[in-house]
Amino acid sequence: NEDVEAEAKLYIDGKLQGKIPGKQRFDWKADDVVIMLGINYVGGLDELTIFDRPLSAEEIATLCR
């Protein structure tokens, strides 16, 4: 486990819906991995993609075209 300064962002249909700044915990052990997604979000999701690096807002917009 490692706590690192980071900022988790949630984009829906290419639009930023929210972010959580501060320490985020990362772990590569599959049994310990948890994804915190859309706290207080009400709605449906039919696709989810997680990347191994931060994407720019422009890259996200391109992916959603």
Image: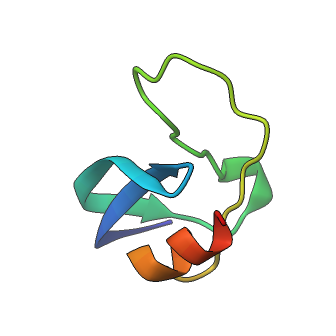
Q: Describe residue 65's horizontal placement relative to residue 57 as left or right.
A: right
Which quadrant holds residue 29? Answer: bottom right
Q: Residue placed at 45% from the left, 80% from the top?
A: 58
Residue 56, visible in the rendered structure? no
Viewer-closest of 31 and 12: 12
Q: Residue placed at 67% from the left, 50% from the top?
A: 32
Q: Describe residue 49's horizontal placement relative to residue 9 as left or right.
A: right
Viewer-closest of 57 and 1: 57
Location of residue 47 in the rendering, given as x and y in whole percent from the top left corner: 77, 46
Viewer-closest of 2 and 47: 47
Residue 38, compared with residue 13, is above or below; it is above
Q: Residue placed at 40% from the left, 20% from the top?
A: 40
Location of residue 39 in the rendering, given as x and y in whole percent from the top left corner: 42, 28
Q: Describe residue 29's horizontal placement relative to residue 10 as left or right.
A: right
Location of residue 62 in the rendering, given as x and y in whole percent from the top left corner: 59, 76
Number of numbered labels in the structure image = 0
Location of residue 9 in the rendering, given as x and y in whole percent from the top left corner: 39, 57
Colouring chosen for the image of the structure = rainbow
Q: Residue placed at 45% from the left, 50% from the top?
A: 10
Residue 41, visible in the rendered structure? yes
- As drawn, the residue found furthest toward the left would be 22
- As drawn, the residue found furthest toward the front would be 65
Q: Describe residue 12's horizontal placement relative to residue 31 as left or right.
A: left
Image quadrant in which the C terminus is located: bottom right
